[in-house]
Image: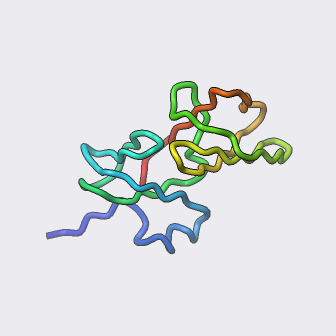
């Protein structure tokens, strides 16, 4: 019987390559159901935690409603923190891609580890 792994060996290994966001989830049908929506690419079934990188959280027109908490302009990009479904999520927005308005929505791009 083999051991199946879908990501880093543990959280410490994952943090070696940069910041991570841990989301509590339920794994089913090849995805992770999180407060930020369904994220494809997760292994297994049942309750779990998934790891995503902050750059995977993006502003989209049809995502989970979010409230902007902080903004820091950094030249060619803006660093922001938003709260979505009770979870603080970092955002890195390049260029003029951020429209500050009451209807801010976020989603996760890519797959979970």
* Residue 46 % position (x, y): 25, 55
Residue 23 horizontal/vertical position (percent): 45, 55
Colour scheme: rainbow
In percent of the image, x 40 and y 62: which residue is there? 7
Q: Residue at x 35, y 47 (%)?
A: 32
Image location (x, y in percent) of residue 63: 51, 31
The x, y position of residue 2, in whole percent, is 19, 69
**Point 77% across, 35% down: residue:** 95
- Residue 9, placed above or below residue 89: below
Of residues 34 and 69, which is closer to you in this image?
Answer: 69
The front one of 86 and 41 is 86
The quadrant in which the C terminus is found is: bottom left
**How many circles with numbers are drawn on the protein?**
0
**In this picture, is 7 found above or below 58?**
below
| Residue shown at 50% from the left, 42% from the top | 108
Q: Single out the residue that lies furthest toward the left.
A: 1
Quadrant in which the N terminus appears = bottom left
Q: Is residue 100 left or right of residue 74?
A: left
Q: Residue furthest bottom?
A: 12
User: Of all residues shown, which one is farthest toward the right?
Assistant: 75
> In which quadrant of the rendered view does residue 103 lie?
top right
Picture quadrant where residue 83 is located: top right
Quadrant assignment, res 78: top right
Residue 29 located left or right of residue 54? left
């Amino acid at each position: 019987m083999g051991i199946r792994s879908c990501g880093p060996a543990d959280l410490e290994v994952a943090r070696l390559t940069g910041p991570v966001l841990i989301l509590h989830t339920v794994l089913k049908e090849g995805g992770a159901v999180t407060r930020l929506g369904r994220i494809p690419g997760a292994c297994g079934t049942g309750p779990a935690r998934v790891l995503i990188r902050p750059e995977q959280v993006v502003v989209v027109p049809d995502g989970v409603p979010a409230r902007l908490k902080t903004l820091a302009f950094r030249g060619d990009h803006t660093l922001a923190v938003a709260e979505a479904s009770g979870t603080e999520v970092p955002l890195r927005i390049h260029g003029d891609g951020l429209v500050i308005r009451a209807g801010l929505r976020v989603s996760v791009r890519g797959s979970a580890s």
